[in-house]
Image (cartoon, rainbow, N blue to C red):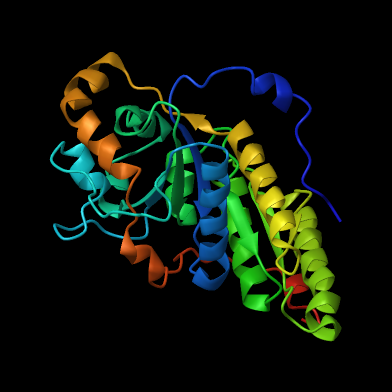
Amino acid sequence: MPELTAHQASGLAGLAEPTGPQLIAMVCRGEAQTELPVLWQLCGALCDLEYPVTVLDATQWESDENPGLLQWLDCRIGVAHANAQWPGCAIVPGAGGIEQFADAQQLQETATLFGHDGVVILYADTSTLVRLLAGTAVRPLLCACRERSSLLSGYQALKRLLQDGRLEPTILNMMAGDEPATSGAAQAPVYSDNLAECARQFLGFDVNSIQFDSSRSVQHRSMQMCQLAMRLLENALPLQATPATSATTSAATSAVTASAHHSVHPSMHASVPSSVSTFATPSALLAPGI
């Protein structure tokens, strides 16, 4: 069972001060019950590491009642919903704003909207991540659990990321810690093995998933999440503003950053829409016993 371990160069990398905000990504496949708890725990881990965190939720649209990235880009307004529980974390609707970007270069020019040492988590479907992050070093977090539907959509997302985006995801295998040992614990390796076999045979990709067991102690889970956060940061996309971008957004920067990291958007508590991507699925994923 693979464990979360630090990269050999992570110690040296930690000595360098970031030159601006860093962007990591998480794949949305419409599985809110699996994905959102992981997203909350990842935000908490980054806050524990003293990073101001902004989640750009590309599955939710901005509005006058629920302002977000689109309003930020227009230099008109920031998000003003207070969040007493996580004073260092903001969750911002961003579907409209994200649509304005064509690639990673344009995305990088949003640096002035976030704190100098902040972390931005882009929570988006596979199509959006491929469009914006193709060819970058970012390793989007892809969650999978033991249900057949999760592994089917997981394979589809993996295929799209690898073939269309040249992106190698970080795969988190959510072990069903609350299931009886005779069903969940026994079946989880079978599902994971099928996904790994299909990825190796049809995609030429060796899956080295990270095992996350929700039945472990809070301390152990917190440690795992902190290690996962550091691993994702090793391949983060630096957001560095150009001089022109800095000039046009400097008037709104202080208001945006002041309000963003003390807010949370309530829309993230709703169900997350599923990705529309569809692919042919290898029959090995439908093997007997699944």
Residue displayed at 59% across by 67% down: 153
Residue 116 seen by the camera:
yes
On-image quarter of the N terminus: bottom right
In this rendering, position of residue 77 left or right of residue 82:
left
Q: Residue at x 72, y 78 (%)?
A: 178
Q: Is residue 143 above or below residue 229?
A: below
User: Is there any visible trace of residue 289 in the rendered image?
Assistant: no
Residue 233: x percent and y percent? 59, 35
Q: Quadrant of residue 242?
A: top left
Q: Along the line of sight, which residue is nearer the eye, 171 or 15?
A: 15
> The C terminus is located in which quarter?
bottom right
Q: Position of residue 202 (x, y in %)?
A: 74, 57
Residue 206 higher or lower than 237, as above or below = below
Q: Indicate left or right for 231 with 114 as reference.
A: right
Q: Nearer the viewer, residue 108 or 246?
A: 246
Tell me what residue is drawn at x 66 percent, y 53 percent.
222
